[in-house]
Image (cartoon, rainbow, N blue to C red):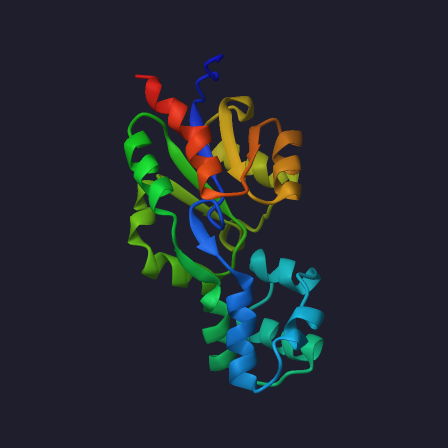
Amino acid sequence: MTQPDKPSALLLDLGNVVIHTDARRVFAAWAASAGVDQQVFLDRWRADEAYARHEIGELRFQDYVLHMQSMTGVTMSQRDWKAGWNELFVALYPRVLTLLRRLAGKYPLYAFTNTNPTHEHSWRSRYPELDVFEHVFVSSRIGRRKPHVDAYHYVCKRMQQQPDKIWFLDDNRANVEGACQAGLKTFRIRSEQDVVDILSPLLAFS
């Protein structure tokens, strides 16, 4: 089997690449708090333009809550919306974390995540182990989000790396396609095992 070309740096998404996330937990928590059927959120909630604006820092959480109330027809306290919102995170993938710790020092490790300040505060406080990354690029902080090509070029420049020398791993097809257009070497992730299979061969490089 041909050994893969050695990358100059690794860039990983967080959700479902490093951290197991599950949107169904969010909808279940909201349904319990509001006293409605979970299907209400499954049918009505959408990752729409307001969602994207929230992820690039243009829309505050309290304003996004007002939008979600209008979108779903459900009224709750901001505290309940926030508590449910943060139920997204399940746990770190243990084998991925172990592998990243072994790769640290061999390769510059970075993450790039589409997220918002509320979620960022949640995963930073829950998972201090993410300090394995030299830097986590957060869409709401940099004002850019995947899958836009300019977002990848911005991140590559900040990493001081050429796009074609970076391996990028993400579970979202559109994000992978955008990164490919930006010139990165891309891998679409569907499971923890995928990450292990892709990155483990890099340990052979000294």
Q: Is residue 144 above or below residue 63?
A: above
Q: Position of residue 170 (x, y in %)?
A: 54, 41
Q: Nearer the viewer, residue 172 or 108?
A: 172
Q: Position of residue 127 (x, y in %)?
A: 33, 55
Q: Is residue 130 left or right of residue 29?
A: left
Left or right? Give the position of 104 relative to 152.
left
Q: Residue furthest top?
A: 2
The residue that appears at 48% across and 57% down in the rendered structure is 21
Tell me what residue is drawn at x 43 percent, y 28 percent.
9
Q: Residue at x 38, y 23 (%)?
A: 202
Residue 22 in the image: above or below residue 69? above
On screen, residue 137 above or below 102? below
Is residue 156 at all visible to an observer of this figure?
yes
Q: How many marks?
A: 0
Name the residue at 59% across, 62% down.
54
Picture quadrant of residue 149: top right
- Image quadrant where one finds the C terminus: top left
Q: Position of residue 113 (x, y in %)?
A: 50, 48
In the rendered structure, the answer to whether residue 137 lies left or right of residue 23 reads left
On the question of residue 67 being in view, the answer is no
Q: Position of residue 10 (x, y in %)?
A: 44, 31
